[in-house]
Each structure stands twice: as structure tokens, then as C-alpha cells.
């Protein structure tokens, strides 16, 4: 596994953040510094926390902590989607479709938290261990 960008959780979270960004452009101007900025920030933070955790995956506790932060931000995104729907900025179909993406991402993040060893760096063999002594 070479890059965090290869992780399915990252791909789903990134696509969701893009969708949210585009949809939030239609939110009223009065929401710019509240709902709009918050939902954009939380959806993007899922991606950044996955990236940070992946780069620290040689330390299981740190990896789990950052992926847990990603899961927290993912849950926050759901709350903002609920507010956007309640305020009438999203129709029910759009809210349900986005909520399903949040749920799928959450399941992937939970798997990563519960199975960190599947994402850990494999120890690299020392160049001297690979050399056969004659």
C-alpha cells in the first residue's frame, strides 16, 4: 500500500467532500460562516485525518487516533447534512444519498480502527540481512 489515496475510505470521503462543496454553493449567503463553512470543513477533515494517520501508521496508537478523528469528523458531517435538510437546503433524496455515503465511509473507518494491523507498514528488511554471507 503506497499511498493514502489508494484507501477506499479516502476515495469515498474525498468524493463526498467534493459533492458537499458543490452542493453547499447553493446554500444562502447568511449560512456562509456557519453551516456552509462547517460542513465543508468537517467533510474535508475526514480526508486530512486519513492522510495524517496513514503517514503515521508505523505507530498503531497514533494511526487509530487519527482514523478515530476522521470518524468523528465524518459523524459531524452527518449532523450538518441533517441541519441542511431540516432548513430546506437539501431535498430528501439528496440528503439520503449523501447520508449513505457518510455511513459507508464510517463503516470503512471503523474497520480501519478495529483492524489497524492490516494498514501498518510492513517492516523493511535491512540491506545487510538480505546479503548472503559466503
Image: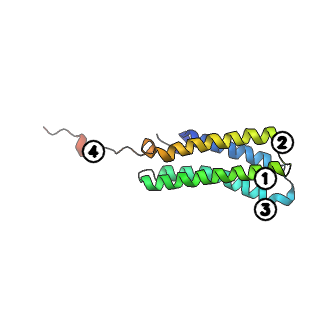
Q: Is residue 1 left or right of residue 93?
A: left
Could you say where residue 91 lies in the image, as x and y percent from the top left?
A: 83, 42
Q: In the rendered image, which residue does mark 1 sit on? A: 83
- Tag nearer the camera, 1 or 4: 1
| Mark 1 surroundings within 10 Å by alpha-carbon count, few (fewer than 14), some (14 through 19), many (20 or more) | some
Q: Which residue is mark 4?
A: 127
Q: Residue at x 52, y 42 (%)?
A: 111
Secondary structure type for disc 3: helix
Q: Is residue 12 above or below residue 47?
A: above
Q: What residue is rendered at 47% in x and 41% in y?
A: 2
Q: Is residue 87 above or below residue 108?
A: below
Residue pictured at 64% horizontal, 50% vertical: 74
Comes first in the chain, label 2 or label 4:
2
Residue, disc 3: 33
| CA–CA distance in space, label 2 to label 4 | 59 Å
Mark 2, residues whose alpha carbon is within 10 Å: few (<14), some, or many (≥20)? few
In this figure, which residue is indicated by the disc labeled 2?
A: 91
Q: Nearer the viewer, residue 106 or 18?
A: 106
Amino acid at each position: 500500500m503506497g499511498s493514502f489515496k489508494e484507501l477506499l475510505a479516502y476515495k469515498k470521503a474525498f468524493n463526498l467532500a467534493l459533492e458537499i462543496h458543490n452542493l453547499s454553493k447553493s446554500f444562502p449567503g447568511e449560512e456562509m460562516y456557519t453551516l456552509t463553512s462547517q460542513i465543508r470543513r468537517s467533510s474535508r477533515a475526514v480526508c486530512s485525518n486519513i492522510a495524517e494517520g496513514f503517514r503515521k501508521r508505523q505507530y498503531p496508537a497514533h494511526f487509530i487516533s487519527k482514523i478515530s478523528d476522521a470518524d468523528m469528523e465524518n459523524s459531524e458531517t452527518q449532523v450538518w447534512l441533517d441541519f441542511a435538510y431540516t432548513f430546506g437546503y437539501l431535498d430528501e433524496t439528496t440528503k439520503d444519498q449523501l447520508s449513505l455515503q457518510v455511513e459507508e465511509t464510517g463503516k470503512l473507518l471503523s474497520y480501519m480502527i478495529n483492524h489497524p494491523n492490516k494498514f501498518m507498514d510492513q517492516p523493511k528488511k535491512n540491506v545487510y540481512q538480505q546479503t548472503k554471507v559466503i
